[in-house]
Image: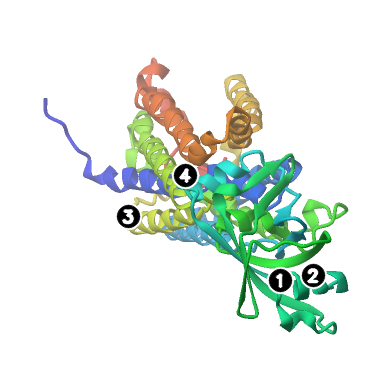
Amino acid sequence: MDVEINKKLLPMKAHYFFFNAGLAPLMPFIPTYARQLGVSQVGVGLMYTVFPFVGLLAKPLFGTIADKFKIGKQIFITAIIFTAIFFTSIYYVPAKTSEAIIDFDCSIMTLLKTCEVSDNCTLTRINLENPDMMSTMECTLTCHSLESQFLEEMCETWNVTDVCNKNLTSIEMKTYSNMSKALLEQTCLYFPVESIMLNETKVENPYCKTASSMKCSTVCNSATVMSYLQKPLTETPQEPYYATVQFQMLFGLMIGAWASTAVVVSLGDSICFNLLGSKPHDYGRQRLWGALGWGISAIFAGYLIDSVSHGKNMKDYTPSFILVFIMLTINAISVSRIKIDYRQEPYAFQKVVSLFKDVKVVLFLFSCITFGICIGSIWQFLFWYLEDLASAQGCDSLEWIKLLEGLAMGIQCFAGEAPFLFLSDDILCLPNRSTWSRFNFTGYIRSPF
């Protein structure tokens, strides 16, 4: 069987594939990324309530400009570039300023402890970072507000004469703990200290005759432990989520990204119908390449995120941002080869308004709005729910949770969207192809409406 390839449509297929492959590594993960930045469910819901209205304004605005000045292709490419800029800029949203504080407890044995652990998978995560659990954790402690009683203990019991000076306001020491002896009791994580290095004096199995404790700033060589110790300096229960720099920067960048994406999608579809000419029913077979790009890229991104996050308490999304930049750069280059036939056809607003007199059109728009509300209520929090569900099922499942989320996207694309797009022409079963002539899909300005 001979397969005829329409070379004119190849750049359009490449656009759908690479543009969606550029969005999939990050866009569906934004709710969980926002959660990692400290944004609440309400904050995420607010963002995704505003975004559709941003697209509603951007589409007709840039569609009108493109049609009026015949610069649709230039706006199209520029919107792809800005989509890449806004999405990759999210990488630079700063984490909250924090410090790592640990309790140094000295009695019949010396312990490092923190009692602000709410994750039951703590020891599992530590084990993932140190599979043999025999490695030694080294921590550098800087302790202030020293008690005279504690200084006396170190001076007499540890035989460290340098600390016998009662005028000391702080001390710095290194502690060494065997990771295999870490303990988790309710919300407290304990690390028994096997030795201490203080002023070039090594103390084995340190202990204190009289129990004492102090809080110390610390830096440990375990990324997992540090992720539990790091606490925001300015975080207060009264601080609303919308007042944080993280929410404001993420919200602002996502508005720009969403507007740019909306323009790309709108003009891209308009260009596609322009190229299809008298065969608009073949749109589904062009658009399915976008579903393939989304599914493949989402799975690959999920795998990479989990791989580079091995042993870390928080997921590292660096691979997502790299994939976004690479794929959208390729996309911008590929669409530069698209040739567009601008038609000198005046725009008539009345024609668009007249469509709303058709009951079928109104019912179709109503169904789109209804489906959008239902899908949006589920889709934006799907990954959030999957992570909560995985935590409830056991700690091991969290290691590859991003891959699981990517696979969820892949199944939607490969088993749902792509097949139906391929068969869309047959499913619609239009009795009369000339019906398409009622709608003009070739002008840029039609796409926003």
Three-letter residue code for mark 4: Ala
Label number found at residue 334: 3
Q: Which numbered disc flags the more N-terminal residue, 3 or 2?
A: 2
| Secondary structure category for the residue under label 2 | helix
Residue under circle 4? 24
Q: Position of residue 180 (x, y in %)?
A: 55, 48
Residue closest to the eye, 118 or 284: 118
Applied colour scheme: rainbow
Identify the residue at image location x=71%, y=75%.
159
Labels 4, 3: front one: 4
The answer, for residue 347, to whether it is visible in the render is no
Answer whether labels 1 and 2 touch (C-beta < 8 Å). Answer: yes
Can you give x and y, in whole percent of width and height, for residue 118 in the image? 72, 43
Number of numbered discs overlaid on the protein picture: 4
Which numbered dot is residue 158?
1
CA separation in Å, label 1 and label 4: 58 Å
Amino acid type at image mark 2: Glu
- Disc 1 packing (10 Å; few <14; some 14–19; many ≥20): many
The image shows residue 288 at horizontal and vertical percentages of 37, 34
CA–CA distance between discs 4 and 2?
58 Å
Q: Is any part of residue 65 visible from this angle? A: yes
Quick one: label 1 or label 4, which is nearer the N terminus?
Answer: 4
Q: Is label 1 or label 4 in front?
A: 1
Marked residue nearer the N-terminal end (4 or 2): 4
